[in-house]
Amino acid sequence: MGHTLIEKIIGNKVGHEVKPGDIVTVDVDWCMIDDIMVPFAVQKFEEMGFDKVANPDSVVLIYDHFLPATQVDDSRHFRAGDEFADKYGIKRVHRTDGICHQLMTEAGYVKPGDIAFGTDSHTVTYGCVGAFSTGIGYTEMAGILGTGQLWIKVPETIRVEIDGTLPGNVTSKDVILRIIGDLTASGATYQALEFGGSTVDAMSVASRMTMSNMSVEAGAKCGVFVPDEKTCDYCRIPYDDSVKALQPDGDATYTKVMRYRAEDFVPVCACPSLVDNIKPVSEIKGTKVNQVFLGSCTNGRLEDLRTAAAYMKGKHVAPFVKMIVTPASRKIYREALADGTLEILSDAGAIITTPGCGLCCGRGGGILSDDEVVVATNNRNFLGRMGTSKVQIYLASPATAAATAVAGYITEA
């Protein structure tokens, strides 16, 4: 019987074949702790009685949610992280470099075939490079810090096949939103989503990151792409036999196979206040907005900023709309500055902020009040996420966000 991509990754780590439902203990390649969870992970680590970190070189601390600090208690999280890093010899600490899920691949950490855990649900993002990655709690993270290991229940896999050429105004964000709408928010619970097909093959790594990132919104344990030459170029590694061996077998067993024609996709939004409440933009066109947010670990990458800039060049944000642009990392910020992307967005009236999570987690400025409407490119539209519980959050692609910012109402690019 053949194996899925996830089964191959986990099997390689434990040294024998695995099947869905198996519970195995793995050596962890990378563990990421964000600023929100640092003090809690440290506390549990100490409560467990550990006196050293098993593998300091595998630990990455990233401050991104609380930067710049907006509440008095935020600095406690930074101090806890710095003190822990100093005490246990952790060298990989990112204080102002950007969002954790962008940095874990951009900075050269997670590679194809790796197993990574992080104290944030969107750790699933690293599946874009063919890694098994998922979010865990701070108690489990404390255990990894002390032992270097964690148990995994091998998930079943749903195969998502997409073939053809996407329409010009459709992005991978529209694709994953449509898939989440079809699956529902719990339709892939504790399963892996394995993406493939000619459409997927043609996608950039950045576009794949968007889809891996939002896999958890369908309940998935991880969302993975088969690593290819693009992946290896991005990761700065050779496309050798060890990477090619991660290709899923032709006779692999899937719990479900979902097939799509790329030409059938249209721009969509996740409407308030559920991420699986998916509607075509054409059905909600004309809904007036107060704010547009372009950024987050879902869609804050260079190609996302360029998509918005290409539409907004020579145009201007509607007079009654605020547009906030938050690059996902310092590297992306500098690239967008160098190629003129940020200048175009700024000339159009957008507010450019420091790299980080920003409005996605209701921090960094831009929160809204009762009955205000925001179109955002991040991954969740839960009640209260961007201000009061009466804020209406629509999730959309960078193309739709840009068109909406200019029009002042929800519309297609």
Image (cartoon, rainbow, N blue to C red):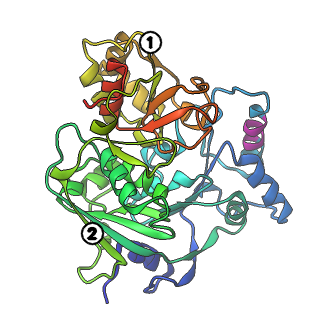
Disc 1 marks a residue whose amino acid type is Phe
Q: Could one spot residue 236 in this view of the protein?
A: no
Would residue 22 be found to the left or right of residue 282 on screen? right
Q: Could one spot residue 397 in this view of the protein?
A: yes
Q: Position of residue 114 (x, y in %)?
A: 46, 64
Q: Give the residues in magenta.
A: 76-82
Image quadrant occupied by the C terminus? top left
Q: Position of residue 74 (x, y in %)?
A: 74, 33
Return the residue at label 1: 320
In the image, residue 37 lies in the stretch drawn in magenta: no
**Mark 1 Cα shell of 10 Å, populated few (<14), some (14-19), many (≥20):** few
Q: Quadrant of residue 267?
A: top left
Q: Residue at x 28, y 71 (%)?
A: 247
Q: Position of residue 410 (x, y in %)?
A: 35, 29
Q: CA distance from mark 1 to mark 2?
A: 52 Å
Disc 2 marks a residue whose amino acid type is Lys
